[in-house]
Image (cartoon, rainbow, N blue to C red):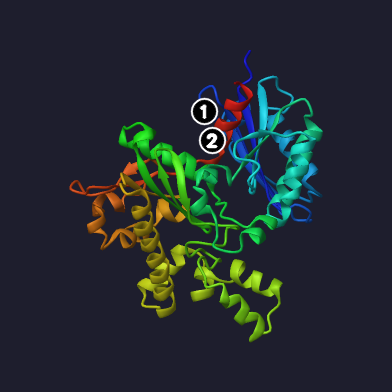
Amino acid sequence: MTASRILVLNSGSSSLKYQLLDMADSSRLAGGLVERIGEGTSRLVHEPLTGPGAAGGKRERTGAVADHEAALRVVAAELAADGLGLDSPELAAVGHRVVHGGTRFTRPTVVDDEVLAEIRSLIPLAPLHNPANVTGIEVARSLRADLPQVAVFDTAFHATVPEYAARYAIDAETAQKYSIRRYGFHGTSHSYVSRATAALLGRPVEDVNVIVLHLGNGASASAVRGGVCVETSMGLTPLEGLVMGTRSGDLDPAVIFHLSRVGGLSVDEIDSLLNKKSGLLGMCGDNDMREVLRRAGEGDEAASTAFAAYVHRLKKYIGAYSAVLGRVDAVTFTAGVGENAHQVREAAVDGLSELGLALDPEANAVRSAQPRVISAAHARVAVAVVPTDEELEIAAQVYALVTQ
């Protein structure tokens, strides 16, 4: 029996998301979430999608889960109840989402002690994410030391961005000393969606140039030429780029100096302001695009301005990345907002006919979980909606590595 199952773990500071996939046919066997880890009100949501437990459907449990090791043990018990235990010989590897790989990690990597130490060394570049990612790896190694533990990095897909585009125009020695450059994030999503767009168009990925717009609470854009990323909107951290749910996106750096010198805010206060209290939330008090659209539709001025700013930034990036690519075959929307908010897609494309973009209003209004083209028949550039699948992308990369 060839081991073909991959367990994908996404460890957050107080959560553990997981999916078990069988890469023999790319099917999902089970998945779920443990949240509020370390609290007395921890909650598990487990959904078996195949096997003996599938008939029972989704299961929810509450109760204290002390730490990530306890969380993974709970997950292991739920999987075992479905006949999908971690001790199964069909389990080939565990894949871990790791947010920041720096310049060292540009492809999926089997984790050993040296690799784990290097991931720890990158914590200053991703202090909110990499510590939890490291914890997830450590816990999984302790439970199945015999299995390959593979790190898949959010930054890896963007490692192909040319040096002139990745560099910031600051003193070179300072930039090198403190690892200051554009890294980009949401890489597994951009990788998956750019390939899926080519498949949707019925063309080889090498022949397709696509602008991918990953629009969730966090949002990023990428320019992908023939399957290779050549530009991306997020930078040293996930703060740069598009207007997001709670992040400001692009900002004059001098705003930080002004807030410090004139406003008397500390570095931590400014960090919190720009990452957690800005974007749509900062502009109108809501970071849920559905609520922003509802309020804007009722004439709420703050919500209308926030939506206009969001769309304006999108248009700027579509235009800029059209210039970077030279030829654009598709603009693809993905993630929660991109997949579900037809008003965002309509507003982002409106007025861009000179770039070859035009929507079919009826196709754009359709809600579907399937990849689809929503551009007008006469449009020179396809506009597509492709649901992202980061867990499948991670599992595919892990499986390719451990079976090569």
Residue placed most toward the observer, 216 or 127: 127
- How busy is the neighbourhood of tag 1: few (under 14 within 10 Å), some, or many (20 plus)? some
- Expressed as whole percent of the image width and height from the top left, the position of residue 343 reads 34, 61
Report whether 13 appears left or right of 181. Answer: right
Q: Where is residue 309 in the image (x, y as percent from the top left)?
A: 41, 70
Tell me the quarter of the picture where residue 106 sits.
top right
| Callout 1: SS | loop
- Residue 149: x and y in percent read 71, 32
Residue 41 is drawn in which quadrant? bottom right
Residue 300 vertical position relative to residue 197 in the rendered view, above or below: below
Q: Name the residue under label 2.
A: 392
Quadrant in which the C terminus is drawn: top right
Q: Do the residues labelled 1 and 2 touch (CB within 8 Å)?
A: yes
Q: Identify which amino acid the numbered label 1 is placed on.
A: Ser
Residue position marked by numbered label 1 in the rendering: 26
The correct choice, above or below, for 140 with respect to 213 in the image is above
